[in-house]
Image (tube, rainbow, N blue to C red):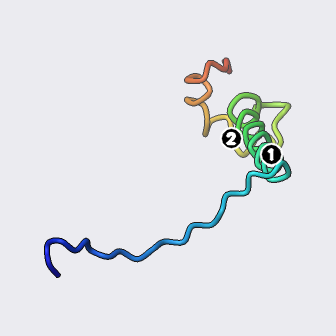
Amino acid sequence: MTSSQAPQSPTAKVGAVDLSRAGAALWLAGTVFLALVIIYFVGIDQGATSVFGSDTHVHEFVHDARHLLGFPCH
């Protein structure tokens, strides 16, 4: 190989991104659902409103995140 020749690299085939309305709506719905689940576990899940009961201690697992995000819990 001489200095005037550029090194050849394999061409990567990248699939097209689905930008249709149905695809966007599906991604939006999934993102909203995931955000609501995270907000529930970090901000709301404790005591009588707990989905898993009081013995799983989800509240204690996310306790510091609750205070960091401004959710009161005491």
Name the amino acid type tagged 2.
Answer: His
Above or below residue 1? Residue 18 is: above
For the point 66% across and 20% down, the residue is: 71
Residue at the left extreme of this rendering: 3
Left or right: 14, with 32 as reference point: left
Left or right: 39, with 6 as reference point: right
- For label 2, the SS is loop
Residue at the bottom extreme of this rendering: 1
Q: Are marks 2 and 1 in contact (CB under 8 Å)?
A: no
Spot occupied by residue 5 in the image (x, y as percentages of width and height): 22, 74
- For label 1, the SS is loop
Residue at the front extreme of this rendering: 4
Name the amino acid type tagged 1.
Answer: Phe
Above or below residue 13? Residue 24 is: above
How far apart are the alpha carbons under marks 2 and 1?
9 Å
> Crowding near pointer 2: few (<14 within 10 Å), some, many (20+)?
some
For the point 32% across and 76% down, the residue is: 8
Q: Quadrant of the C terminus?
A: top right
Spot occupied by residue 58 in the image (x, y as percentages of width and height): 68, 40
> Crowding near pointer 1: few (<14 within 10 Å), some, many (20+)?
few
Q: Quadrant of the N terminus?
A: bottom left
Residue highlighted by disc 2 = 57
* Quarter of the view holding residue 60: top right
Spot occupied by residue 57 in the image (x, y as percentages of width and height): 68, 41
For the point 72% across and 33% down, the residue is: 39
* Quarter of the view holding residue 50: top right
Left or right: 13, with 7 as reference point: right
Depth check, front residue: 13 or 70: 13
Residue highlighted by disc 1 = 52
Depth check, front residue: 1 or 74: 1
- Which of pointers 2 and 1 lies earlier in the amino acid sequence? 1
